[in-house]
Amino acid sequence: MRIRAVAAVSGALALTALTALTALTVLPASAAPAGGTGKPAAAAEPVLSKVLVNGGKDIVLGTTAPKTITLSVTASHASGIADGWVLLWHGTDPDEGMDGALVPEGGATCKNASATAATCALTLTIDPKADLRWNKVAGSWHVLAGASAKDGGLTSYDSYTTARVQRLSKLTVNAAPEPVKKGRTITVTGKLSRANWEDHAYHGYTGQPVRLQFRKKTGSTYTTVKTVRTNGTGNLKTTVKASVDGYWRYSFAGTSTTPAVTTAGDFVDVR
């Protein structure tokens, strides 16, 4: 039983996580099948074949708005599948090093693919104010997943796979002056910021490389002109020579904790 796993998780979330975790017989992460597929150690236990979190996409949250996602586990057993569960936890070890847990609100809805296999889906609503209280939990989360068979057998992996929970990013651009004479200098400014889950505001993302890109008015694709690094407040500023009408934009590739973001193009009329 993973009773100590939620010692660092507070409030109602701790109670929910405790109920969910201690209700399972959890196999250690080292027993999980390589690559997230394969047969558990005991033949009588259900076999997990697929676990999906948010449709395989990163989970991105801002400072206040809750987000609802879908979790699913596909499993099989000779007697059929009765139930499935998926939850996310953050930390180094579920016994001693957990500092966050995201637990679905209700039970799973299972849809049979055959007499022996089923996919069980759950809904998880994440509130950044209530559930994500520290910026340090951004990044990779462990995915606990399991299933129970109709004959009573069950299996669960505390780290079957992983999913990323990220801090929403914002990016702005402004190219000036506009219009501008051909051959004159254009200054392109902007700012890269991201959600702070501790004070529920957006702060500049410092020291990050951001690409300045240009598309001709008559063109269809953007080309990277140079890479600009954000300063100590997340601001961007660089200069280029005006040569032809077109659109200027900034593009950030993202990091493990923060998603990629690209601005719309800012048109400059060159005369």
Image (tube, rainbow, N blue to C red):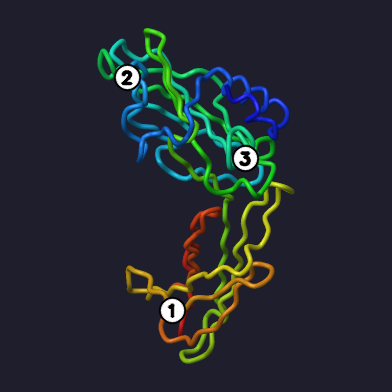
Which corner quadrant of the image does residue 15 belong to?
top right
Q: Is residue 30 above or below residue 47?
A: below
Label 3 element class: loop
The residue positioned 47% from the left and 62% from the top of the image is: 253
- On the image, the x and y values in percent for residue 51 come to 39, 32
Neighbor class of circle 1 (other Cα within 10 Å; few <14, some 14-19, many 20+) is few
Q: Are marks 3 and 2 in contact (CB under 8 Å)?
A: no
Which corner quadrant of the image does residue 91 belong to?
top right
Kind of residue at badge 2 = Ala
Disc number for residue 65: 3
Separation of residues labelled 2 and 1 (CA atoms): 58 Å
Question: Nearer the viewer's eye, disc 3 or disc 2?
Answer: 2
* Residue that extends furthest to the top in the rendered view of this protein: 151
- On the image, the x and y values in percent for residue 34 come to 35, 39
Of the numbered discs 1 and 3, the one sitting upstream in the chain is 3
Of the numbered discs 2 and 1, the one sitting upstream in the chain is 2
The residue positioned 62% from the left and 56% from the top of the image is: 194
Q: Which residue is mark 1?
A: 225
Q: Quadrant of the N terminus?
A: top right
Kind of residue at badge 3 = Ala
Disc number for residue 43: 2
Kind of residue at badge 1 = Val
